Image: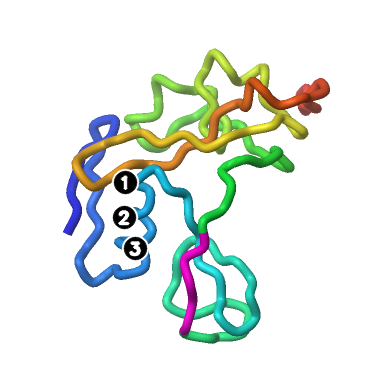
């Protein structure tokens, strides 16, 4: 079992949760991997026992590049979890308050890991400062 606290919230991954234990064991090594179905070859997230598309039980963990482009987001103004209140407004890709105005559709992002406890690191997306990027589109409401 893995137990830790993050932003004052308890985190726990039970010994019976094999898929998440595997996922977070790679994250602890700062190695971003996703499950890929052995049959249909589609990636799946979150980790699961069976493929949601073809129900195959066999899968493999494939190292993937921790880079991408924001295609959609939502902005949270009322934090339901008290630990996140100080970060509002935030985007559900968890941009810090100081970065909210810089993130939108088209923003290039990269993977960073936050070490929380021995054997547990959380993958988080950050703005990829080195990527060639236009002006991200944001809804102005």
Q: Which residue is mark 2?
A: 25
Circles 2, 1 touching at the beta carbon (< 8 Å): yes
Q: Secondary structure at mark 2?
A: helix
| Residues drawn in magenta | 58-62
Circles 2, 3 touching at the beta carbon (< 8 Å): yes
Residue at 62% x, 27% y is 128
- Could you tell me residue 21's position as x and y percent? 30, 61
- Could you tell me residue 64's position as x and y percent? 56, 53
Give me the C-alpha separation between circle 2 and circle 3: 5 Å
Q: Quadrant of residue 47?
A: bottom left
| Residue 89 in the figure: left or right of residue 67 | left
Above or below: residue 13 compared with residue 89: below
Q: Which residue is mark 3?
A: 22
Q: Main secondary structure of the magenta part?
A: strand
Residue at 37% x, 42% y is 122
- Could you tell me residue 113's position as x and y percent? 41, 36
Marked residue nearer the N-terminal end (3 or 1): 3
Q: Which residue is mark 1?
A: 28
Residue at 61% x, 20% y is 100
Q: Quick one: quadrant of the C terminus?
A: top right
Q: Quadrant of residue 82?
A: top left
Above or below: residue 115 compared with residue 29: above
Q: Quick one: quadrant of the N terminus?
A: bottom left
Q: Nearer the viewer, residue 15 or 72?
A: 15
């Amino acid at each position: 079992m893995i137990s830790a606290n993050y932003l004052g919230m308890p985190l726990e991954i039970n010994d019976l949760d094999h898929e998440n234990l595997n996922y977070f064991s790679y994250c602890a090594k700062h190695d971003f991997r996703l499950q890929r179905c052995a049959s249909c070859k589609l990636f799946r997230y979150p980790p699961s026992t069976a493929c949601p598309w073809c129900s195959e039980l066999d899968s493999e963990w494939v190292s993937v590049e921790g880079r991408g482009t924001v295609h959609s987001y939502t902005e949270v103004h009322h934090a339901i979890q008290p630990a996140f209140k100080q970060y509002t407004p935030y985007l559900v890709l968890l941009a810090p308050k100081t970065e909210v105005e810089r993130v939108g559709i088209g923003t290039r992002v990269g993977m960073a890991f936050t070490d929380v406890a021995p054997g547990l690191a959380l993958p988080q997306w950050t703005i990829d400062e080195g990527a060639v990027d236009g002006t991200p589109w944001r809804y102005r409401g």
